[in-house]
Amino acid sequence: MSIIYDASAKTLTLHTRESSYQLQIGPLGYLLHGYYGRRAAGDFAPLHRRKDVGFSPVPYELADETRGFSPDTLPQELSGANAGDFRLSSVCVSLPDGRRGADLRYVRHEIRKGKYALPGLPAALDPDGEAETLSVTLRDEALGLEAELLYAVYESRDVITRALRLKNIGSGEMKLEKAASCCLDLPFGDWELLHFHGRHAMERQPERQSIPHGEVRISSRRGESSHQHNPFLILCGKHTTEDAGDCLGAMLVYSGSFELALEKDQMDALRLVAGIQPEGFSWTLQPGESFDTPECLLCFRHDGLNALSQRFHRFLRRDLCRSAFSEKARPVLLNNWEATYFDFDREKILSIAREAKDLGADLFVLDDGWFGRRNDDRSSLGDWFVNEEKLPGGLEELIRGVKDLGLRFGLWVEPEMVSEDSELYRAHPDWALRVPGRKPFLSRSELVLDLSRPEISDWAFETLRGLLERYDIDYIKWDCNRSLTDLCSPALTDGRQGELAHRWVLGLYSVMERITAAFPQVLFEGCAGGGGRFDAGILAYFPQIWCSDDTDPIERLTIQRGTGYGYPLSSIGAHVSASPNHQTGRSTPLDTRATVAMAGAFGYELDPGKLSEEEKARIRRQIRRFHDCERLLREGDLFRLTELADEKDYDAWQLVSAGKDESLVSLVLTHPRANAKPLHLRLKGLDPEASYAVLRYDVFDAFQPEPPEEQPKQVTGAALLYAGLTLPRMMGDYPSVQIYLKKTEE
Ligand code: DGJ
């Protein structure tokens, strides 16, 4: 049993292999948070002070005898509102008579096998039948509100999931103003915040900072999880490194506007409230109706950030993603976007596909520009029929041509948006979000289809189904190139417009759920102008997401590092593109571009017709190398070999197979120096008792004044872990090296 109820101490303890989480049913039914940390047994509640700190209100029933008992200072499992706790609220409702708040007290709990479900929302599954669920019901009798706190424990994964179900048990209408997925109080500890901010083409830049007193909010109000902030954060101890120390990750399984709010209070306790963005949100519940929040994934590790990332990676791949591709080898694809942009015709596409096949690619992707009259980004979204001027003979013929080459075929779509200049918009101008009396905002000349309306999300599903039924398509790149504005839907009357942003996301999920279930053989890749919606909600349906429109490998080092703190490498769409790079103008060696792209769902995005024979030969070798290491790259444990704060002249990372029998080390030199110090790496994750053969994939692009040094044929794991490897000197702009290690018999 991973969930234990101790009736005498009134504690509920959730154990994973390496962590424990405790709740306590306190006086007057307050549900107190006891502990979340390294696995330990016992009753943690006595650790918490119950001291009168002044100006912190005490429940009436306890007033004089127990002045120290205040919801304002005690760690709580769910923080109410207007109920004696001045810190961040996680739930708040209002009634038509003006009453507002939430004061929720314990009623009952239940422990059961299996995983709770959140209908209509993506949430972790239970593929190995190991999950156990704890449901704790609380009530605010005065306001007629019931809350069911849902926890699932995945013991072997070190992951605990949380969600909240709110129900109107009163006799009249109720409005939810705030419905967070998770409230987590950490009464002790000096926590730092590691979060992932950015912008278009520069997503998920890791930033680690101390947490000041007051409030810090990581959030999106853009209707999508956004390029700017990610619904994932890590709290870590001041001295936590990649390989040691406490850290706690919280990840929302949600793709819409969100908020991860932190408050460090007067006594230095930290509260995290994670969930749907409360600004602008409201949800009406009639008597008997309920509302489910998105899920929040929690993982605690005492042994550093690498271990934490590895747990999230495995969990997302195995327990969250429904796609059969999640744990399968993915095709090496070649996408024509950076090769042609909108400027292509049938012959050009077929010649790129021919070259792609010759290079060793498995799948060709036709990106934007194949439909309607789409010759630039100003028209035709919504008109999902082929542009016969560009592609005479239609998609059938083109696909046949590609398949005859022995390649699989992929297609780009953007089903959530519509161009003003489109047949769809002319037929249904009322399908786009807009505030009556105002012109809507345009973004990339697009408007947003109102997916909250079932007839419109059904249209999106039917359109995609039509394409997938008619054409022999193996892969879909699902793009979304703008944020949501003009939030107003004619379907939401009676003061319900506050539901729109979340209903829109539910509409999107219903399309994704239906289409992926109907076409399980199709590999879907998410995309939102690069990585504008890189989140666990999308990854529940699609096993990979295009990480960023910035394909410069040196920029990608940071973008992919930031993404990889939470998301598995196999989910990070990464392509080798042309040099000089189209976004930065930087020139980099072809092998370095491949080294970086291999730390992701690997592919190419360039015109092979512009490559020299020598470059083509190099790409053939890269693809062979990728296939050799495919499983290791997809399933291996990731170890970052540098600290975030290090000012190193290189970035390096390592993948180690589950049995520690093989490993791939990659290093990219970001700053060559005169008379450089030796490049020395201490490796991680290997078996110290074993011997490894060390094979270097040489750096052909770099100017090497000396021949590569001879590597010892066999080295012990202990030597690689405790002494490390010294690499040959590398010079020039951005060379890289990959070193493959294989356990030997003796
Ligand atoms: C944004 C994507 O990130 C690109 O890869 C490409 O598909 C364009 N959209 C096409 O419009």
Image (spheres, grey):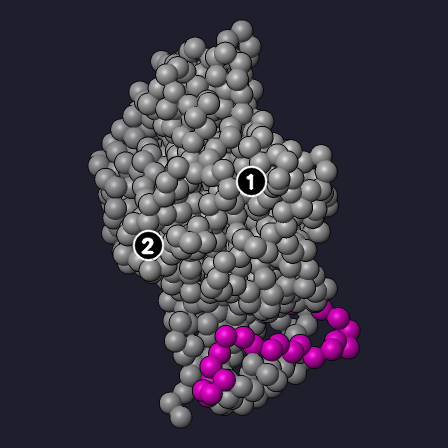
* Crowd around label 1: few <14 · some 14–19 · many ≥20 (10 Å): many
Mark nearer the N terminus (1 vs 2): 2
Q: Amino acid at mark 2?
A: Ala
The residue segment tinted magenta is 668-693
In space, the residues marked 1 and 2 are separated at their CA atoms by 24 Å
Q: Mark 2 falls on what kind of element?
A: loop
Q: Quadrant of residue 630?
A: bottom left
Q: Which of the two residues, 739 or 457, is positioned nearer the viewer here?
A: 457
Q: Amino acid at mark 1?
A: Val
Seen at 42% across and 83% down, the residue is 743
User: Circle 2 sits on which residue?
Assistant: 131
In percent of width and height, residue 568 lies at 45, 57
* Crowd around label 2: few <14 · some 14–19 · many ≥20 (10 Å): many
- The quadrant in which the N terminus is found is bottom left
- The quadrant in which the C terminus is found is bottom left
Residue 656 magenta-drawn?
A: no
Residue 677 magenta-drawn?
A: yes
Q: Which of the two residues, 617 or 299, is positioned nearer the viewer here?
A: 299
Q: Is residue 104 visible?
A: yes
Residue that extends furthest to the right in the rendered view of this protein: 674
Seen at 58% across and 30% down, the residue is 60
Circle number at residue 558: none
Circle number at residue 273: 1
In percent of width and height, residue 136 lies at 39, 42
Q: Is residue 605 above or below residue 240?
A: above
